[in-house]
Each structure stands twice: as structure tokens, then as C-alpha cells.
Amino acid sequence: MARKPLINAPAPHTAGALGTAAVMRQVLYTTLPGLATLVWLFGAGPLLNVLWAALVALAAEALMLRLRGRPLALHLSDGSALVTGVLLGLSLPPGSPWWLILIGSGFAIMVAKQLYGGLGMNPFNPAMVGYVVLLVSFPLAMTRWAEPGQPFSLSHSLSLFLDLPGADGFSGATPLDTFRTWVGNAPLLAEQPILHGHVAGAGWEWVNLAFLAGGLYLLARRVIGWRIPVGVLLGLAAPAVVANLVDPLRFAGPLFHLFSGATMLGAFFIATDPVSASTTPRGRLIYALLIGVLVWVIRSFGGYPDALAFAVLLLNLAVPFIDYYTRPTAYGHRSKRQ
Amino acid sequence: MIRHLWTRARRSESEYDFPGGVHPPAHKARSNAAPIRVGPPPDRLVLPLNMHLGAPARPRVTVGERVLKGQRIADAQGTVSTSVHASTSGTVVAIGPHPVPGTAAGDALCIVIDSDGEDRWGPLEPWPDYRRAAPTELVQRLRQAGIAGLGGAGFPSAAKTRLGEGQRVHTLIINAAECEPYITADDRLMRERAGQIAIGIDILQHLLNPSRTLIGIEDDKPEAIDALRAAMSERDCELRVVPTRYPSGGEKQLIQLLTGLEIASGTLPSQAGVVCQNVATAYAIKRAVIDGEPLISRITTVTGDAVARPGNYEVLLGTPVEQLLQHAGLDRHRLVRLLMGGPMMGFTLSDTSVPVVKISNCLIAADARELPEPPPEQACIRCGDCATVCPASLLPQQLYWHARCDQFERARQNDLIDCIECGACAYVCPSHIPLVHYYRYAKQALRAHDDEQIKADRARLRFEARQARLEREQAEKEQRRRARLEANRDRAAATSAAPDHHGGNQKKQLGRAITAYKAAQRAAATAEAQGAANAVELRQRASDLKQQADRLQGRAPQADTAPSGVVAAAPKATPTATASDQRERRLKALKSAYGRAHKQYKQAHAALQRAQRAQAEHPQSNDHNDVAGMEQRVAQLKARADQERAALDTLMEQAKSDLQQRAGKDLKTLKVEAARAEVALRRHAERLRAGRDSADTDTLRRWDAELKQLEREAHRSREALTQAVRAQGLVED
Ligand code: SF4
Ligand code: SF4
């Protein structure tokens, strides 16, 4: 009787982790409420963004893997390219033309990820690299957001996406833009309807709440750790509270900051990208706090209305440094190192 | 206050905690329901000589010998070792290699016994009144009874309880945590035999005299907790229930959890006054001391979906795993993975003929659904989960990178050695990287590298010692030879006045001088290589002899024609080596002597550091006795290097002050002058070249003359410098 040989494997023999692919899947599912809210507010544009960006990301990943002679199935199945594409798609203004997304998503995967050696090797968050490349190259297209709550029809969204001639008609700015425009002017600030939603800026508050809900689910399922989201939100809210107390006309309040722009998306989905974040437990908290503070600083004093992408990339740069100085003291070395 | 609340919140009876940890599914209910059953009566026993950690035991039986149950068949040898006993009566049929279980699977020396089926005990020697025995006697008894840690590591208990001079144990910890999933052997043992465990603890207390005794147990064993509590009620011992979390049963983690103490890296808990013993070991100690029964059986959990009757079995050591599994109702067709130990730290068995040994606390026969093939390893996404759960506060991900890139020294700097291989990191890794596998590989490589270094260091020390002896002998011989040579030369000088043979004499002299020089040269070279104290003298003598030989050689051709009187006078007339020449040679010799001495010191120092590091990392291995010797040697070499340096410095100083006196200038001034002249010369040459086309002939001529003058001056100062340097024996370098 020919018996199959017994499995010979190193310990441990059970795995408690979901697996990278499962983690990525969970992340994808939990972005859905946010995406749905965006669609509700802006029409089909965000959905087109996400689908197209994801498709481009997958294609770019496959192309690069082939060029680098890596096993396609194994690496594509980890789902990381898909997540990069989706996150980039979620960050782009609705009505972005197809070529813009193609450039951003392609650059994110090909240059920011694969040229650095693929998953796990990229020092920068690929989605944010793609975003910043677009923001710097096409500043106009990247800052034109439609009025939330007045969604475009499907045909309008499509013609914008396909960049058909005559398809135009942007109006409105985000709450962050509006605040910047009228900063310091009490009556005018009070007149802007977009600044006065239920919790924060109208419309955008729902987007942020939806991403918060998804993020809390990830946290509860322990797909992400608490340090990064809590750090980012705290780093953003703390200076906002202080500054708002000092000069409420010049500095928006913490709620406004927390529920505007890409705050929740960034705190729960973007800054938590494990590859480009700090790896030590203490380092992660510092990393996240600094992202939060930097977002507040750039929003309050910088030239761009939102700042998440820049803050994340800048902190990516600081990761080796943070990691080095936050190395935990190994067991049995407490007396030696102190 | 806060700490108290925190303790309450964790439902822990200990106010301390350890970092990290994981909560793998327990799977304990399957095997902890039924009482302990008797294991299968084996037909054949295979008893490895290294069932424990440390040096293997040495057989004391021969093939064909009849043995009784409990008879000692192999003796402990070395400080960290323990004995082996026949677990049943029968005949020794083989002593040789046999497959044994272990992480590094393979064959090891085993004693194989064919059972005679009678299971007849040999004479036992119970010590019910152990309190009369001195601690050393008790330790000896544990060693002869073959007691080793039954928790899974197999560390010989005698080595753990033998205290050094003046060593005190303030805390005795009884490890009842049993934190690994699946395993319930200790759980059942505590439920059924708590009384005997308590007596075992009494014995340990008597042996170690600790100020307090703590029992650490996880809160998932309520029945065992009750049983222990009842057994310990009258005793001076605290039972601490801690929350279930892997690896709270790791020795270092349990110590930290119960006492808040951290055992410094590279030291043993006993050095910090803590001794930790497993409950099953305490039970075995009771059997060994009170009943006189050596360690010949243990409780092993047999579980997994591929066995019909999971539970705990009291198994004779040496029973083949195959037989135990059959006994528990193994379905061979369902079995895909067989583990010895728990799922976190256990190892796979591919051969079921291996025996149950002292560390075999569990066998898991899993089917494909229970423990499927590990998923493919993917790229590390730097998620840091591994660092969050590491109980040793390491950065597993960093260690993984270093191990993967074969940067073992970097891994060492990141405290790889402090990894307890608990597997918590690999358990949570979303990329399914077998991290522990990488760590073992890196540790092995480091260990091999260290061993190599130590071996090389030792060989060098031996070689140097031998070399030193030879040098000494040779130098003495050389001295005698030289005396003889001198006598010969005197004789030759005296006889060469005679007209005949003077040419031949001369040649003979020359030949002798050359031989003498060569011998001296050799002696000096070897003396230097060894760093002998008289190397400098030898080197100087060698160069004296060389000069002598040169002189003779220079005269040899004329000798044939020259009048004999000249020849006779010659030795006296030849200018002897000037003082500065001598000094130059001496300086040279001193310099190289210092260089060598310094190098030797450096090497010995590095060797010492390596040896010390090795000792710190593998404290239980006892082949580092030569550290003290090395320390002494390093000190000696350093002293010698310093001495050479001092001699060199004195000589240099002397040379410098001589120069100052004679030339009125010191070397630095001379150097500056020479350099200045050089610069002036170059500048003039530059001017001349530039002005060649523009300036008139007279000017050019004047410049040319000036240039010539400068050239002469530069030459002069250069000469002065070289001369001064040479004359004072200040070798330029
Ligand atoms: S195996 Fe080593 S590195 Fe991994 S968690 Fe355990 S102690 Fe830490
Ligand atoms: S848990 Fe695995 S994937 Fe995550 S950082 Fe550690 S080694 Fe990398």
C-alpha cells in the first residue's frame, strides 16, 4: 500500500492570520459604503473612476510582473494592485477623464510599486504617488469637484469620463476650498451653505461618515491596528481644537477637519497601508500622529486645500528614521540599554 | 491603583504582564475529558541517549545483556546531562543509530530493548524521608533518576537545581500554564495527581529553600485549579491564575508574568534567583525521590482528527510512536500531518518508528482539514503584526530580512539570540512566511560560525605556544653557536698572519659569517613572529652579523693578493658600525617588534571577545573553560606591546634630542627649510618659463642664475635633511 508521505513543515503548524489576499478583500469591501455615498452625491463619476483605475492597476501589475519574470497568478492574487487602484479611484474628482486615471493608476503601479521591487518593497504609498503626480501635472483637472448632492446623469458622467467635446459644467468647490476662500470673513463664512451640514461640510460629512463606518469595521475585525487611524485623527483634531479656540475665524474646528476632504479615507484606508508605514508599534503611532498634524498644517497654511497625499508621502520618507528610533527594547536587554 | 484595576480587567491574579502573545484556538476539550489511560505495552523499546538537552548519556550495558525495569542503562556525562533507564524488563538487542524525534530529524545513538513481557522491576530505593538528605545528594539523585524538564524543552533538572557557591533562589515557579493548544497532559495530571505534585513541590522547596513559591496556571483549566488549590491549601505556596494567552507558559514569559522580572539576555533564570519547573517534572521528582522510581514513563496527549480515542496516555519512554497511535485508534488514511509537541512549537514527524521520549508531551495526528498544507509564502507587506505579538519585543520582520539575505551578524545585532522560537509572529503573519524557520536557519549559521572561530582561536593559541617554545630553544642554540663562532674568528685572526692558507681562511671566515648571519636572521624572524621578549636583540645581532659578512665579502677578492699583514690588521681597522647606524637598526627592530606585539594583542583580544560572546550565548555548553586563560594571555600581550612602544618612544626621543644638539635644529625645522627651498625653486622655475618670451635677455640670464643658486640651496637642505634623518636613525615613514 503506497501511503502518501506525511507533510513535513516548520512550526507553527496553524495560521491565525487571514492571509494577505483576505486582508485586501476585506479592505475592498469596506470601501463600498464610502463609494456608494460618493455615487449618491456625485453620480456615476466616482464609480467609473474606481472601476477604470482598478482595471488599469491590474493590467499594469500584470505587465510589470511579466516583464520582471515573476509568477503572475501568485502575485496578482494578493489583491494589492486592486486596492491601490481602488484607493486612487476614490481620491479622484468625479468626472475625471479616462486618460488622467490611466496616467495616475499606471504610474502608481509601474513606477511607485513595481520599479521598487513589487509588493513590500515600495517605500511610498503607490496610490498617493499616483495622486500627487496627477495633482502636480494637471492641477486644474484635479481640483474641480462638482457640487455635492446634485449628481450628474449617467450620460453626463460618461461623456466627462470619455472626455467628449462639450461635456463640461463643473461648479462648486469642496468645503475645504470654500473655507480657504472665505477664511477670516465671518459674514461670508456664515453665508456658505456648503460649510454648514449636520456635523461638518455639507455632503462631504456623509462621505467621511461612510468611510468611518467601513474603517471601524476593519478595526473591529482586527484587519487594521488602532494605532494609525487613531493617530491620524488625533494628530489632526488636537491642533484644530487649539487653533479654533484661539481664532475661530481663521481656523476651522476639529469636526470640520475630521469630516471634510479625505480625512476618514486617509486615516483608515490610506495611511494604514502597511508597506509604506512604520513597522514598530510605537513608530506607527508617531507616524500617524505626524500625518495628522501635517494634514492640519497644510490645510491651514499651505497652498493646497487638502493635504493627505502630501502628508502621507512626507511621512513615508521619514519611516526608516522613525523605525530606527522606535525599536523596542528586546526581552532581557532592559538593563543593558538603559 | 491603576495597576490593580488593570489586573482586574485582565482577570489575572498577577499584577505583571508580558508583551505580545496570541490566542490560537485551544482544541483542548477533545483530549481533556477522559482520565489518563495506560499506554500500550511495547514489544520493543528504543531509548535515545539524548532524550534531554545537553550532553548525551553514556551506555553502561552491552548488547545481549538482560535488564530490569527501572535499571539505569546509560549514565549522565558532563554538567548538563541526565541518565537513561530501561522502561521495562528485557534484553538489550542493539546499541546504535536509530531515527529519533526532534527538530533536526535524523538518527541518533539509541539503546534498543526487546521486552520480555514480564515488566519486572529491578530493586528500588525509596527515600520517604528525603528531608534528611543534603541538597547535593538530592541533586545527585535527580541526575541518576534521569529527570529532565517534561514541559517540552528537556532541560536536565539536576543542572537546574544545582546551585553555585553563594547562589540564592528567592522564587520557585511551578509552570502549570500549559499554554500550547491541543495539549492537556499537565491538565489531566493536575486533576488526578495533585497530591503527588504537591509533594514534588515540597521536595523542590527543600532543595532550593526559596522565599516564595508561585504556581502559574492559565484560567482555562478550572478543574485543575481546584485540585491544585485543594492540594496546596496547607502549604506555603501561591497559586496564580493568569489569563489564557500563548506563550504564557514560556519560561521567561511566565517569570515575567508572575514576578515582573526580566532575565537578562544570555543568563539563566537561576542567576537572577529564580528557578522554574514544570508541574509534570515536579511529579516525576516526587516519584524519583519518595518512591525511588526513575523517569521511565510520561503522560502524553494523543489527539487530532485522525485518532479515534483522543486522550492522555501514560506511556513508557521508548515506545514507538506508531504503536501509541495504533493504541489510540489511528486512521492511517486520514493522517496527513503528524506532530510531536503542540501546533505552535512542535515539529512534524515523517517516520512513525521514532520513540516517545522525555519531551514528547503531545502527538497530534491531523487530517487534511485540520492542518492543511501551508499556503504559499508571499512577500512581506511590512504590516508589523509580527512585532505586535512578539513576547520578546523583537522586530521579527527585521530579523526575517536579515536571515533571508544571509546577514547573520545584522540579525545578531537585532537580538536574534533572544528569540524563543515561540512562533507567535509566524502565526499572525498574513503572508504566511515561516518566520521561525528562517530564525532557526540563521541561528544555526551563527552558531556554526562561532564554533569555527573558537576552534580557529584555539588552534592558533596552541600553535603560538609551541612556536614560543621552539623559538626559545633556537635562540639558546644560536647563542652557543655564536660564542663558538667568535672563538673561531679570533683563532683565525691569529693564524691568518701566516702567509699560507690566508685566502682559504678568509673564505672559510666568510662562509661562517654568512651562515651565522642566516641563522641569526632566522632566529630573529621566528622570535618576532612569536613576540618573544628578546626579538629586538636578536634582530640587531642579525644585522651586525650581516655587516660583518659584507665586510668579509668585500675583502675576500683582495685577500688573495694583499699582504698578509694588512689582512691581519684588517678586522681592527674596519670602521665599526657608527652609533647612529646601530640606532637606526635598533629602531627598525623595535618598530617591527612593536607592530607584531600589537597585532598579536589585537588578535588575542578579538578571540577573547568571541569566546566571551559564545559563552554568554550558550551558557549551558561547558567548553569555554579557556576564557580565563585567554584573558590572562591578552593582558600579557598588552603589557608586552606597551613595553615595546615605550622602548621605541624613548629611543625616538633620544634620537631627536641628539639631532637638536648637533645640528642646532630639530627635524621639523630641517623639514620646513627643505620644503621652503623646494617651493622657492619651483616658483622661480615658473617665472622663468613664463618670462621666456617677454623678458629681455639680461633679466632672463639673471633669473637663470638665481634659479641655479636656488637649486643648489634646495639640494643642500634636502641633503641635510636626509643626512640628519639617517644619522639619527629616525627612519622616515
Ligand atoms: S518566534 Fe521569536 S521573533 Fe517570533 S514572536 Fe516568538 S520570540 Fe518573537
Ligand atoms: S507579519 Fe509577516 S507580513 Fe507582516 S511584517 Fe511580519 S513578516 Fe511581514
Image (cartoon, coloured by chain):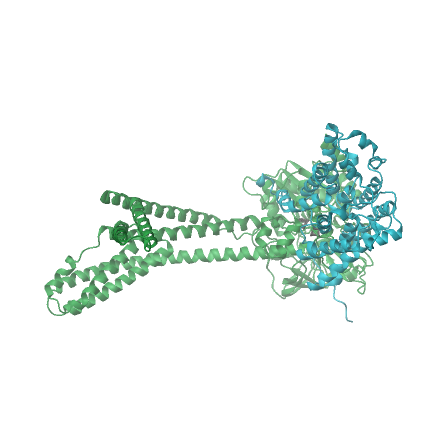
* Extreme residue toward the bottom, this view: A1
Q: Colour of chain A?
A: cyan
Position of residue A99 measured from the top left corner of the image (x, y, whole percent): 77, 55
Vertical relation: B129 (above or below) A47: above
Give the quadrant of residue B48: bottom right
* Of B463 and A97, the residue lying toward us: A97
* Of A79 and B388, the residue lying toward us: A79
Position of residue A68 measured from the top left corner of the image (x, y, whole percent): 68, 63
Q: Is residue B40 visible?
A: no
Position of residue B544 measured from the top left corner of the image (x, y, whole percent): 25, 57
For the N terminus of chain B, the quadrant is top right
* Of B448 and B358, the residue lying toward us: B448
* Of B513 and A203, the residue lying toward us: A203
* Chain that the image shows in green: B
Please name the residue shown 20% across and 68% down the image: B507
Position of residue B183 measured from the top left corner of the image (x, y, whole percent): 76, 51
Query: In the image, B526: left or right of A317?
Result: left
